[in-house]
Amino acid sequence: MKRVTGIGGVFFTCKDPKKMTEWYQKHLGLDTNPYGATFEWYESPDSSKKAQTQWTPFPQTTNYFAPSNKDFMINYRVENLEALVEVLKTEGVTIVDTIETFDYGKFVHILDGEGNKVQLWEPID
């Protein structure tokens, strides 16, 4: 079973997400949107299948990364989230919440070996 297939997003905290987004747009040319920036790319081996990676600044006061006290969170793309969660449970990995489904995919949060919150995403491309 494949587990992680790529990076789905990079999330971090900062003092002013709006200003940070504007800075990255102005100085590094990110094509920004209300959620940060979305990088589109093509999956291999099927080079016609478009995918994306999200870049999002969050306010320093967010609780979204809890229970981790780190100021970042990585989102990993996976192929079969439900099966992976079952395997991770048998391996003793802490599952923070239950799988949620949205029109753009399924999500769940886990903790890595040092207590960093990690988001797993099965996209609906």
Image (cartoon, rainbow, N blue to C red):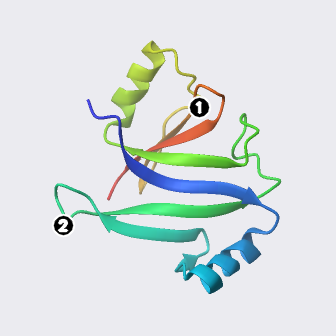
Which residue is painted at 51% across and 15% down in the image? 92
N-terminal of the pair, mark 1 or mark 2, is 2
Q: Which residue is mark 2?
A: 48
Q: Nearer the viewer, residue 33 or 2?
A: 2
Q: Is residue 57 left or right of residue 28?
A: right
Residue 51 x/y as whole percent:
33, 62
Q: Which residue is mark 1?
A: 97
Crowding at label 1, few (<14), some or many (≥20) Cα neighbours within 10 Å?
few
Task: Give the position of the N terminus as an image quadrant.
Answer: top left
Crowding at label 2, few (<14), some or many (≥20) Cα neighbours within 10 Å?
few
The reply to whether discs 1 and 2 touch (Cβ–Cβ < 8 Å) is no
Q: Is residue 8 left or right of residue 23?
A: left
Residue 39 x/y as whole percent:
44, 69
What separation in Å lies between label 1 and label 2 (alpha carbons)?
34 Å
Element at badge 2? loop
Element at badge 1? loop
